């Protein structure tokens, strides 16, 4: 599984999302454009429902960024900590905290 990791050159910290990093960045750039679009809609006094629909689309797009990161973290960092018997419980607790925050809405 080590080949799935990329290591930050300065910190030395490994990330399991490395193979999908470029795709995630592209998705975030599209989301950034959507947010700017909502700002323009507000400036133009557009219909509330149209703005709310766009906000819903952004929320969905953010989930499409977060879910692969969550899966990558679980299958990479958490699984490795459990299998190596080095901080598995701590990683599970950390994961559960993130899931709780993520599902709050």
Image (spheres, rainbow, N blue to C red):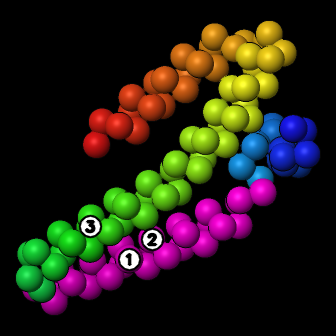
Q: Does the magenta stretch include residue 84?
A: no
Give the dominant element type of the magenta stretch: helix, strand or loop. helix
Distance from the alpha carbon under mark 3 to that under mark 1: 9 Å
Q: Is residue 91 shown left or right of residue 59?
A: right
Classify residue 59 by image quadrant. bottom left
The relative height of residue 92 versus residue 45 in the rendered view (above or below) is: above
| Image coordinates for residue 37, horizontal then vertical, percent | 32, 82
Distance from the alpha carbon under mark 3 to that under mark 2: 10 Å
Classify mark 2: residues with Cα within 10 Å, few (<14), some (14-19) or many (20+): some
Classify mark 1: residues with Cα within 10 Å, few (<14), some (14-19) or many (20+): some
The relative height of residue 98 versus residue 41 in the rendered view (above or below) is: above
Q: Can residue 82 be seen in this view?
A: yes
Q: Which disc, if any, is residue 42? A: none
Q: Is residue 24 magenta?
A: yes
Contact check, label 1 and label 2, Cβ < 8 Å: yes
Q: Quadrant of the C terminus?
A: top left
Q: Is residue 75 shown left or right of residue 96?
A: right
Dot 2 corresponds to which residue?
Answer: 31
Mark closer to the chain start, 3 or 1 = 1
Q: Which of 57 and 46 is in front in this view?
A: 57
| Image coordinates for residue 22, horizontal then vertical, percent | 71, 67
Q: Nearer the viewer, residue 24 or 67?
A: 67
Q: Is residue 44 shown left or right of residue 81?
A: left
Dot 3 corresponds to which residue?
Answer: 55
Q: Is mark 2 on a helix, strand or loop?
A: helix
The relative height of residue 2 versus residue 80 in the rendered view (above or below) is: below
Dot 1 corresponds to which residue?
Answer: 34
Magenta part of the protein: which range?
19-45
């Amino acid at each position: 599984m080590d080949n799935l990791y990329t290591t930050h050159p300065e910190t030395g910290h490994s990330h399991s999302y490395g193979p999908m990093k470029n795709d995630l960045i592209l998705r975030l750039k599209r989301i950034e454009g959507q947010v700017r679009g909502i700002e323009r809609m507000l400036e133009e006094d557009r219909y509330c429902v149209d703005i709310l629909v766009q906000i819903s689309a952004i929320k969905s797009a953010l989930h499409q960024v977060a879910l692969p990161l969550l899966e990558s973290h679980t299958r990479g960092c958490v699984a490795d900590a459990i299998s190596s018997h080095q901080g598995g419980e701590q990683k599970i607790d950390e994961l559960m905290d993130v899931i709780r925050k993520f599902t709050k809405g």
